[in-house]
Amino acid sequence: MLKYTIKRLLQSIVTVLIVVTIVFLLMRMLPVDYYFTEEQLMKFTEEQKQEQLLQAGLLDPLPKQLFNFYRQLITKFSLGDSRRIQSGVAVTKVIATRMGISMRLGVISLCISLVLGVLLGIAQTRFKDKLVDGIGTAYIIFVNSVPSLVSYSLVLVFGSQVLGLPPLYSTRNPTSITLPIVCLSMGSIAGYALWTRRYMVDEINKDYIKLARAKGLTTKQIMIRHVLRNAFVPLAQYLPASFLLTIGGSLLVERFFSVPGMGALMTDAIARYDTNVVQGCVVLYASLGILGVFLGDILMMLIDPRIKLTGNGGTR
């Protein structure tokens, strides 16, 4: 396990470096005029522009710029300063202020969706092909087939008009997080319910369950001790990634409810050509996504010792 862990960790680091390098080079392919604000473009002479670019290192050869970027990142943990989102403010500080808001909403919605989704999946399995299963299936189909903007609009109208909840996010009103959390949770509840039901139904049809029934175990004992435990193993693989990616926020939900989180930061940075912020977001997203997959494999092995992951794939 130690050998596999070290190998996967090194692979993850290399993957992050490749992704960040590609984005860095793409950002450097933009015209240099995007480095300046509209006011600076009108105010600066050509000589002043060249001097600013020289000081920023943008006139250096690309290999040297890339080396300086990684040296600054590794030695100072610095991603440079924002040029347009928050002019002169460190990118790490810009990201940190947005990250807290997204993570708070994301973690709450993750906990809610995990509990409700797994419980719904268990109920569907327990009452397979009955009313509860039908209702759960209808909910899953509705969430996956209806466009997100339509379902979010229904939540917004019902929550604001019927329940009197605030339609937009506000730091001054704690109840304003309710509707964004509901929308963030809807899809995840459907996903967890779908996969929990699927894995539990697969487990119920296996021979060891028939043996457990023959030994006199009750349905409740079989469901908890055997079926749910084994069905939870594949679900556990995705929990670390789901938790870590809550930091990244949800672009659609945060835009819809005007939440000043991470979801809109990267698109704003791209639209306003703030290359340092774009690079910072890419470093964050790539690291979180790859780390989540890595931790998911480790967690799956810890939960079920029968799983042995090797260089040739997983065996059980």
Image: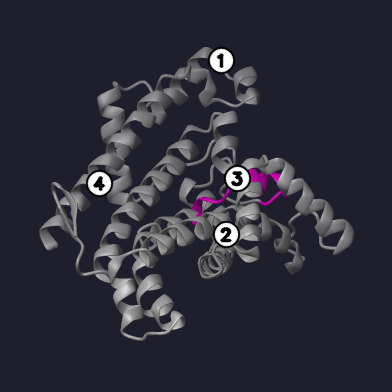
Residue beneath the point at 32% across and 80% down: 214
Query: Which amino acid type is shown beneath numbered disc 3?
Result: Asn
Residue beneath the point at 42% across and 47% down: 284
Furthest-top residue in this view: 46
Say whether marks 4 and 3 touch (CB < 8 Å): no
Query: Which amino acid type is shown beneath numbered disc 1?
Result: Thr
Q: Residues within 10 Å of mark 1 (few under 14, many from 20)?
A: few
Tell me how far mark 4 sits from mark 3, CA to CA. 34 Å
Instruction: Identify the image quadrant of the N terminus.
Output: bottom left
Reading the image, the residue beneath label 2 is 189
Tell me how far mark 3 sits from mark 1, CA to CA. 55 Å
Q: For the residue labelled by badge 4, is the local secondary structure a helix, a strand or a loop?
A: helix
Q: Residues within 10 Å of mark 2 (few under 14, many from 20)?
A: many
Q: Which mark is residue 144?
A: 3
Coloring scheme of the render?
Answer: one colour
Q: Is residue 52 left or right of residue 268?
A: left
Reading the image, the residue beneath label 1 is 45
